[in-house]
C-alpha cells in the first residue's frame, strides 16, 4: 500500500516536472522546430516534389491574346482564375495570390506591353486607409497623404462622413482646405481675421474653401453628409489640426478666465479630450437664426467661402461632360482649380498633362484606367475604382479611360490659379504635318485626320 502510493507520487511529480519543462508541447508526436543537418543541399536523402505546375487549366479574358503592345483593358470580372498573360508575354500563376485584387487591378496583373520601367506610384485606394470612427455613430473620416502615397507632395485628401446633426468640431489648420460635397448636405461657418462671419448650407456637388488659419466648423443637416476635402500640402494629417476643445484644454484656466472675462469655475465642465467627430443638436432649418454678425458684418459675397457648383451646368462633350471651378469663378479659393469630369462608357478623358501643377484626382463613380508617362521612357498603367485617389505629377501625361459599364465620374484638382491642360491630340494637330511626319512617320492619310480642337473627353 505504502509502496504503491510512493510510485504514484513519483509519477505525479515527474509528470508535473515534464509539464513545467515543456509547457508548449501539445502532443507526444511533436516535431522539433528545426530540421537536421541532412537537409543541407546535395545530401543523398534529398527528394524533390513531382508536382506539375504546367497542368493548370485557365480561361482568358477577351483581348488577352491580342499583342501586348495593343494594351486592351482586360476585364477579369467573369474569369475564374485570371493569369498574368498578354499576347505572347507572361506566364501562369500557380502560387499564392489575391484573386479579387488581380481582377480589380488587371493592368497591374497583366500590364500593357507599352508599360516600361518604374514610375512613381500614382494610386491610393481609400479602402486601404484606416477609418477614424466618430463618437456615438456620428460619422467617420479617412485620409490619403504622403505617408501612403509618397509622390503626392503637393496635395492630400480627407474623406469624411457626418450623420444627421453630426459635427466636425470647430477647428483650423495651417493648410488651405478645398472641399466638394459628395452626398447629402451640411452647414458650414467660419470667422475671418477681420471678424467678418460666414455661414452657408451646401449640398451634393457644391464646393467650399477655407483659407489657412481661418477657424471653421461643419455640421451635417438632417439627411447627413459625405464630403471630400483636399489640402494644399501633401503631408497634411487630419489628426494634426488645431481643435477648439484642445485650445481650451491646454491653456491655464486662470488665463482662460482673464481672456474671456468669466470666472475660472466657468470651465469646470469643458471636455478634456478632443471631440473630432461627434453628435450634435440638429441645426435650425432657418439659417438666419445661426447667422451671427459683429461690427465687421459678414464676409462680402465675392469673397464667400462657398460656391454652388451643383447649380453650374456641365459642358457637353463628344464622350461625356465637364465643368470647371477655379479662382476665375471662385476667387477666394486661390490655388485650387478643379474639373468635374463625366466619361461615358467607352469614352476617354484624352491624353493630356498639366503644365502648372500636379493633379490630385478622386474617382467618385465607376471604374477607369490611366497610364502615367514619365520621361524619358517610363510608363505605368493603373486601374481605378470608385473611392480610389490618383496622383499625376506636373507635366507627366495621362488619360482616363472608362473601363466599366456605367458613367465614370472623376474630380481632378490642381494646385493652380486657373485650370489648364495641354492636349496631345491638339498639339500634334496644330503642328506642321511635315514636322510630325519626319518625327512619327505617320501616313498622309492619318495626318489628314488629326484634330485641331481640344476634345477633353473623346467617345
Ligand atoms: C447618397 O447616398 C445614399 C445612400 O448610399 C444613396 O441612396 C443616395 O442616392 C445618395 N444620394 C445622392 C444624391 O447621390
Ligand atoms: C447673414 O447676414 C448677413 C447680414 O448681416 C447677410 O448679408 C447674409 O446674406 C446672411 N447670410 C445668410 C446665409 O443668410
Ligand atoms: C428666420 O429667422 C429670422 C431671424 O430669427 C427671422 O427674422 C425670419 O422670419 C425667419 N424666417 C422664417 C422663414 O421663419
Ligand atoms: C516609315 O514607315 C515606312 C512604312 O510605312 C517604312 O518603310 C519606313 O522605313 C519608315 N521610315 C522610318 C524613318 O522609320
Ligand atoms: C505626303 O504628303 C506630302 C506633302 O503633301 C507629299 O510630298 C508626299 O509625297 C506624300 N506622301 C505620300 C506617301 O503620299
Image (spheres, rainbow, N blue to C red):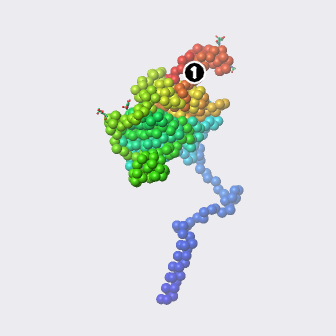
Against 393, residue 258 (above or below) is below
Task: Please state the horizontal and vertical placement of residue 179, each as a whole percent of the image.
Answer: 46, 35
Q: Which residue is mark 1?
A: 425
- For the image, the number of numbered tags is 1
On screen, residue 426 versus residue 216, left or right, reads right
Looking at the rendered structure, the secondary structure element under dot 1 is helix
Task: Please state the horizontal and vertical placement of residue 196, each as a whole percent of the image.
Answer: 43, 34
Q: Ligand 5 near label 1 (Cβ, under 8 Å)?
A: no
Task: Please state the horizontal and vertical placement of residue 204, each as a whole percent of the image.
Answer: 40, 33
Against 343, residue 222 (above or below) is below
Q: Quadrant of residue 161?
A: top left
Look at 41% across and 37% down and name the residue there. 189
Tell which of 383 and 333 is nearer to you: 333
Tell which of 136 and 451 is nearer to you: 136
Look at 64% across and 62% down and name the residue there. 35
Task: Please state the horizontal and vertical placement of residue 343, each as a whole percent of the image.
Answer: 47, 27
Confirm whether residue 264 shows in the render.
Answer: yes
Confirm whether residue 126 shows in the render.
Answer: no
In the image as oriented, which residue stretches furthest toward the right?
A: 42
User: Label 1 neighbourhood size at 10 Å, few (<14), some (14-19), many (20+)?
Assistant: some
Look at 59% across and 17% down and name the residue there. 429
Tell which of 239 and 91 is nearer to you: 239
Look at 47% across and 21% down and name the residue there. 317
Q: Quadrant of residue 17?
A: bottom right
Amino acid at each position: 500500500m505504502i509502496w504503491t502510493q510512493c510510485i504514484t507520487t513519483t509519477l505525479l511529480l515527474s509528470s508535473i516536472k515534464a509539464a513545467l519543462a515543456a509547457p508548449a508541447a501539445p502532443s507526444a508526436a511533436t516535431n522539433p522546430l528545426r530540421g537536421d543537418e541532412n537537409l543541407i543541399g546535395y545530401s543523398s536523402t534529398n527528394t524533390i516534389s513531382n508536382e506539375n505546375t504546367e497542368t493548370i487549366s485557365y480561361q482568358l479574358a477577351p483581348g488577352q491574346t491580342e499583342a501586348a503592345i495593343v494594351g486592351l483593358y482586360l476585364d477579369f470580372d467573369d474569369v475564374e482564375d485570371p493569369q498574368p498573360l498578354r499576347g505572347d508575354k507572361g506566364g501562369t500563376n500557380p502560387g499564392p495570390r489575391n484573386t479579387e485584387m488581380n481582377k480589380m487591378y488587371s493592368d497591374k496583373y497583366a500590364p500593357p506591353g507599352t508599360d516600361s520601367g518604374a514610375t512613381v506610384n500614382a494610386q491610393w485606394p481609400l479602402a486601404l486607409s484606416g477609418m477614424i470612427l466618430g463618437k456615438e455613430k456620428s460619422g467617420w473620416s479617412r485620409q490619403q497623404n504622403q505617408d501612403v502615397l509618397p509622390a503626392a507632395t503637393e496635395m492630400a485628401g480627407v474623406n469624411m462622413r457626418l450623420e444627421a446633426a453630426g459635427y466636425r468640431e470647430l477647428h483650423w489648420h495651417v493648410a488651405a482646405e478645398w472641399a466638394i460635397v459628395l452626398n447629402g448636405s451640411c452647414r458650414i461657418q467660419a470667422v475671418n481675421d477681420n471678424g467678418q462671419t460666414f455661414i452657408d448650407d451646401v449640398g451634393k456637388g457644391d464646393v467650399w474653401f477655407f483659407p489657412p488659419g481661418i477657424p471653421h466648423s461643419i455640421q451635417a443637416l438632417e439627411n447627413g453628409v459625405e464630403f471630400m476635402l483636399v489640402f494644399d500640402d501633401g503631408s497634411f494629417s487630419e489628426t494634426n489640426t488645431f481643435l477648439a476643445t484642445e485650445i481650451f484644454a491646454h491653456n491655464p484656466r486662470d488665463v482662460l478666465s482673464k481672456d474671456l472675462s468669466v470666472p475660472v469655475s466657468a470651465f469646470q465642465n469643458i471636455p478634456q479630450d478632443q471631440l473630432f467627430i461627434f453628435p450634435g443638436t440638429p441645426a435650425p432649418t432657418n439659417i438666419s437664426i445661426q447667422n451671427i454678425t459683429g461690427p465687421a458684418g459678414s464676409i462680402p459675397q465675392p469673397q464667400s467661402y462657398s460656391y454652388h457648383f451643383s447649380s453650374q451646368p456641365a459642358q457637353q462633350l463628344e464622350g461625356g461632360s465637364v465643368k470647371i471651378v477655379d479662382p476665375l469663378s471662385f476667387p477666394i479659393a486661390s490655388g485650387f482649380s478643379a474639373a468635374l469630369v463625366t466619361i461615358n462608357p467607352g469614352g476617354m478623358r484624352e491624353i493630356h498633362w498639366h503644365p502648372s501643377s500636379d493633379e490630385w484626382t478622386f474617382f467618385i463613380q465607376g471604374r477607369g484606367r490611366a497610364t502615367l508617362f514619365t520621361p524619358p521612357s517610363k510608363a505605368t498603367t493603373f486601374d481605378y475604382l470608385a473611392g480610389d485617389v490618383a496622383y499625376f505629377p506636373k507635366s507627366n501625361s495621362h488619360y482616363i479611360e472608362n473601363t466599366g459599364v456605367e458613367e465614370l465620374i472623376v474630380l481632378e484638382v490642381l494646385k493652380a490659379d486657373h485650370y489648364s491642360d495641354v492636349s496631345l491630340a491638339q498639339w500634334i494637330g496644330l503642328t506642321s504635318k511635315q514636322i510630325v511626319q519626319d518625327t512619327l512617320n505617320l501616313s498622309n492619310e492619318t495626318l489628314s485626320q488629326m484634330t485641331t480642337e481640344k476634345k477633353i473627353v473623346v467617345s
